[in-house]
Amino acid sequence: MKVPRDISHDEIVIGMLKADPDFANEYLATALEEADLPGGQFALLAALRHIAEAQGMSAVAARAGIPRESLYRALSPKGNPTIKTFLAVVRGAGLHLAVSREPLVA
């Protein structure tokens, strides 16, 4: 009997995104909402990387108009994409960002 190998968190999330592409909407929206929390920017970058991996990095890179190697580098755990790259990847993944007003705290 074969013992199943451990499955990483990343692999599980990518599998969920492949199984339900609409999950990307909620996943990225939640990551954006939590981006100002400790570790939030790292989580936002990871979410965008997971979405790109689920759709195929080459395909997302082509739709974003950036070289595949640049996409891998920008979305790596040590990556620091420019806003231009970030927005291109979001669009390349078939998503868009929306802004809403929060009540101001006096």
Image (cartoon, rainbow, N blue to C red):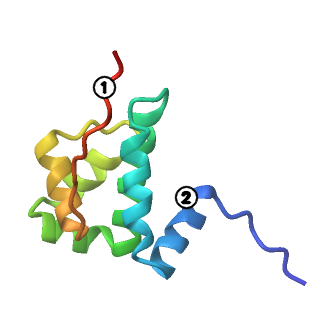
Quarter in which the N terminus is drawn: bottom right
The residue singled out by tag 1 in the image is 104
Res 58 quadrant in image: bottom left
- Label whose residue precedes the other's in the sequence (2 or 1): 2
**Alpha carbon separation for disc pair 2 and 1:** 36 Å
The residue singled out by tag 2 in the image is 10
Residue 5 in percent (x, y) is at 75, 68
Instruction: Establish if 24 lies above or below 37.
Output: below
Q: Is residue 83 left or right of residue 106?
A: left
SS at mark 1? Answer: loop
SS at mark 2? Answer: helix
Mark 1 belongs to which amino acid?
Leu
Instruction: Establish if 1 lies above or below 85.
Output: below
Q: Dot 2 surroundings within 10 Å: few (below 14), some, or many (20 or more)?
A: some
Q: Residue at x 47, y 79 (%)?
A: 20
Instruction: Establish if 92 lies above or below 31.
Output: below
Dot in front, 2 or 1: 1
